[in-house]
Image (spheres, rainbow, N blue to C red):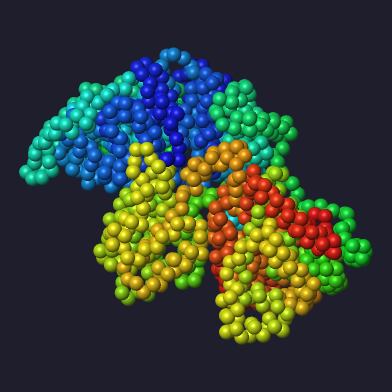
Amino acid sequence: MAERSFAKEVEKLRLGDGEEFAGEGILAITKALLQCGVGYVGGYQGAPISHLMDVLADAQDILGELGVHFEASASEATATAMLAASVHYPIRGAATFKSTVGTNVASDALANLASGGVTGGALLIVGEDYGEGSSIMQERSHAFAMKSQVWLLDPRPNLPSIVKAVEDGFELSEASNTPVMMEVRIRCCHVHGKFIAKDNKRPAITVADALETPRRDTGRIVLPPASFLHEKEKVSKRWPAAVDFIKSRKINEFFGPDHGAIGIVMQGGMYNAVIRALQRLGLADAFGETDIPLYVLNAVYPLVDDQFLSFCEGKDAVLVVEEGQPNYIEQAFAAMLHKAGRDTRLVGKEYLPMAGEYTGQVMLDGLGAFLRAEAPLLLSAEIRAPNKQEQGEEIPDLSRVVPGRPPGFCIGCPERPIFAATKLVEQELGKHHIASDIGCHLFSIMPPFELGATTMGYGLGPASASAFNSPDAKRRSISFVGDGGFWHNGLTSSIGNAVFNKNDGVIVIVDNFYSAATGGQDILSSRADNRTKATKHPITKAVEGMGVKWLRHIDRTYDVGKMQATLKEALTTEESGPKVIVASSECMLNRQRREKPLVAKAINNGERVVKPKFGVDEDICTGDHACMRLSGCPSLSVKSLDDPLRDDPVAHIDQNCVGCGNCGEVADAAVLCPSFYRADVVHNPSGWDRFLDRARGAVIGFLQRRRESRRLVFADA
Amino acid sequence: MLDRASSSRADGKTGDGGMIKLAILAVGGQGGGVLSDWIVDVAERNGYLAQSTSVAGVAQRTGATIYYIEMCPDLNPGAGRLPIFALSPSQGDVDILIAAELMEAGRAIMRGFVTPEKTTLIASSHRIAAVSEKIEPGDGRASSAKVRETAELASKRFISFDMEKVAVESGSMISASLLGALAGSGALPFARESYEQTIATSGRGVKQSLAAFAGGYEGARGVNKAAETAAPPPRKAELSAASPAGPDRLVDGWRHLTARVERLPEEVRDMALRGLRKVVDFQDEAYGREYLDRLERAVERDKAARGFALSVAAAKHLANAMCYDDMIRVADLKTRSTRGARVRREVGVKDDAVLQTTEYFHPRVEEFCGAMPAGIGRYIEERPKLAAFIDRRINRGRRIRTDSFTGFAMLWLVGGMRRWRRALLRHKVEQAHLDRWYDLALDTVADDYALAVEVLNTRRLIKGYSDTHVRAQSKFDRVLSALPMLKGRPDAADWLRRLREAALKDEKGDMLDGALKTVATLGE
């Protein structure tokens, strides 16, 4: 079950014609799919489209009623390969994933799908994880569209526009027999807005119907000679059809006056930021009414030559607002102008940065510079040549004061003790080459652990250590892979590869029962019951099946001592071949989400419940913070004492502690200090509990009184 | 009400039509999403159009996160024309900034989201230390005062108090008290009731959320009136004047000791009394006399013109040095009646619940020897094979239940070894170390008073147990190893202070080694 439940929100998917839908962007996209009569949907979770997968998972009843098939695909390649159902059958299908990482994985299937082309509309909804908050390499999805010649929509970031883009996308796909990608940026996915709904449509042909009447057409299969014809067909038939559709359906939009000396062309996704900059420059109103001609590309690939050229007609200069690099659109437009022999000056990356997100400030600076240079008279005097700001009181620079706050392991995270153990093993055996993977466990690269040298892709942690396999080496490599990455790709690419190539390294599989970093979706090895998916397939069995001989399973990662000993054994054993450790404990975020209400209910109902929490004796803690260098738990922090004898703050555990046990285990395994204690609170104690407590209290109280009556007792000591 | 809302152009031709821009900076897990949803709900409840965005994903896991909301009055309702909202905050263009933690307010200022012409900055004054602040062996925390001072300058209005405390006291989350502070600030043109309706219809924990909301609301109002921005309280607990409880003989003895403190220079008295309490509590009154004997040696050499800095430092660090952290002390502290009460308070145990307490011990042969009579302890230490043999038998983690008969009794007995402490190896080792250090400091006074004070302050480095303690000792020795190179230099004290500060920066003392290299080149 995912971290966030959309059980309530998915009811909005039932809204009918004319009713107003209010909610998040991703929910709107789901509704749009249903309105388009989609026949099947699949995808792989990852920000920013994790919630789209969660919404679909929570909406299975509604999907079922409409005869829509939903898959939580094993990977983005699987999701895209699923679109093969639209090759021969006129069924609309959609796949969704994070881009560009997901598109990378999907590209094999995507290229095959694009070559043969589709009959039913095939839509790829890619969540563009670019700019602030992104957790991946900064690249563009645009290149994938270009190389496989699938069309790319980049709608304006508001709910009516993205809903329309879904509808347009399916039709464009069918009109041009080409899969269509629709990119939605991270903030657009989470934008809260409204649109007027339409009725949901049952697919004209369901996947069940298709199974009953199988079809095939050798001409659509990617094998010579058909594949040669596919390439020609792409440019001779599909491309012109797409351009015609984009023109006739007015996918791209024009705003502002018909004529002007200058104009701005932009990706649809950039529209709101451009308008905001124009508003701040005094050239647009709240509704986006502006004096500057704007050409908004809701379809960024293919570009429509004559549309662009006619936009440039009579203009001295046109600015292209294109986020990211290379600047494919700008280059294409420049070529069009050049070949058409036009003298309109085309600018883009001269005024806007080549790389990086186009934030509000970047847009304001870029557009301001463009307008000041190319059309200064449009600007009011104070904006054209602003007076130097009154030198008020200088605001001090806080960059040396404010600490960075990168993401890290949550309170009680079961992965923390794994890395605490790794750090302790390294203290004993020395530094090792450590290969990291994608997932929460990648936080190990940050302080306080600072473990891990590379990350090469999802499920590729052990694969990325495969070169480090030398008979001359005395030290082994250590690589990590999460359960998500393991099932996504790791089983074959990492484990199978290590077995086959007799890799001697140590592989730690971090099993937290979910695809946790993406929001806690279930995967094959999840321990939860799932109504529609098969779970509880142990990773250990899969690893054994791959041929791993040295395998250890740690079923409680919080046992730092055991983790440490096992890792040490793996690094020093005489046995050859990969040494695989599966370290399993449930993701604490999901566990708390599951257990907290149950525990609260049980306590309310008078049931006996033991709740653990950790604490620190502040008079025993010496304030050396060694525990924090092996933890980094948000709940374990520093606290000043109001004792002038003490200089440094001591450790303190706040009320958010979930009692995972890491503090005590680490203090023990690393021989740190006796300051920690675990307090188990027995709620609704039984009669026996009470009796024992009273009896113990009597004896303990007697001993305490005896000692305290023979010494000085200071009031507030 | 925002001043700028009224100044927006009536024709709505250019500009943003009275749009209000609000950003929330929070630490992942603080409930910024809930707050953001609430604010949108309040705005829509008041007939505004609103849009919120966020960057969800793995970046939210305990890291700095940002939520952004834009809203404006529905200028022509029913016309179907929607204003164009931006999806992310821009520098210099944020009307209200809510920071759910003080350093996040600092981050907002750094990023240019707070400007003196425009921004109402509502920030909780509490701190959530970042990992980088926590892992320093010394005090690595960022300066809250600097952020507060800067916030005053950088914002149009700065409303700040501990909203986390308000929330916790109401049994709620900070999102509720922040919403209260937003309402109380009056920065949005909405009535208090509409906020409360939003909370009331949100479902769970309504009562607690409303209480936290009210706390936040009143807090923001109060801060408005007094224009005070929560200066931290002076961090010095008052010493209780009352005599300690105990047998008459001991109370009499205590009076004699305090009388000696009264005869010390006034500047020294407070610290000396604290130190005295600590050492007497650690051992006994005779130990208190030893403490005062030592301290008086410093006072004799001290100078009133220097404010008795030497004696104050001696009073503090002597007490800490004399109260070393041995097994006896730990066992004693863990078996006191006050300790049980404190645990119940900190954990928040209700009266009818039963508390079970587990302690984590990991004794090694070093601690074993330390707790032996000096002769036996040394005998073992000098025989590595024997020491290793004993270590194999005792070196493992032991979890002791101090709420059980046996667990408590075991610690109680160890705590009772106090009476023999003076004969034990650890005590001899600690005394010798203390004497060397203290003599070194006092011998330095005549030549360089400031340097002597810094020698005393070097004691701050000694802390931790087992390996951490060994590393601390090594840093202490390395810092003092610079003394011969520094003596005679006018800036010797400064250098020794710098070395100490460097030693507190990282675990192994890499910064210290660097600083020592610099010191080595000073004479060249």
Q: Quadrant of the N terminus of chain B?
A: top right
Rendered position, A677 above or below B468: above
Q: Residue at x 32, y 29 (%)?
A: A63
- In this view, the residue farthest toward the left is A225
Q: Is A714 left or right of A257, judged from the image as shown? A: right
Q: Quadrant of the C terminus of chain B?
A: bottom right
Tell which of B510 and A562 is nearer to you.
Answer: A562
Tell which of A652 and B400 is nearer to you.
Answer: B400
Residue A444 in percent (x, y) is at 46, 57
Tell which of B178 and A147 is nearer to you.
Answer: B178
Q: Residue at x 68, y 76 (%)?
A: B370
Q: Residue at x 84, y 64 (%)?
A: A711
Q: Residue at x 77, y 70 (%)?
A: B418
Q: How many marks?
A: 0
- The quadrant holding residue A615 is bottom right
Q: Is residue B44 visible?
A: yes
Rendered position, B122 above or below A405: above
Q: Is B171 left or right of A126, judged from the image as shown? A: right
Residue B327 in percent (x, y) is at 69, 69
Q: Is B249 left or right of A452, judged from the image as shown? A: right
Residue B374 in percent (x, y) is at 72, 81
Residue A22 in percent (x, y) is at 43, 24
Q: Is residue A401 visible?
A: no
Tell which of B237 and A358 is nearer to you.
Answer: B237
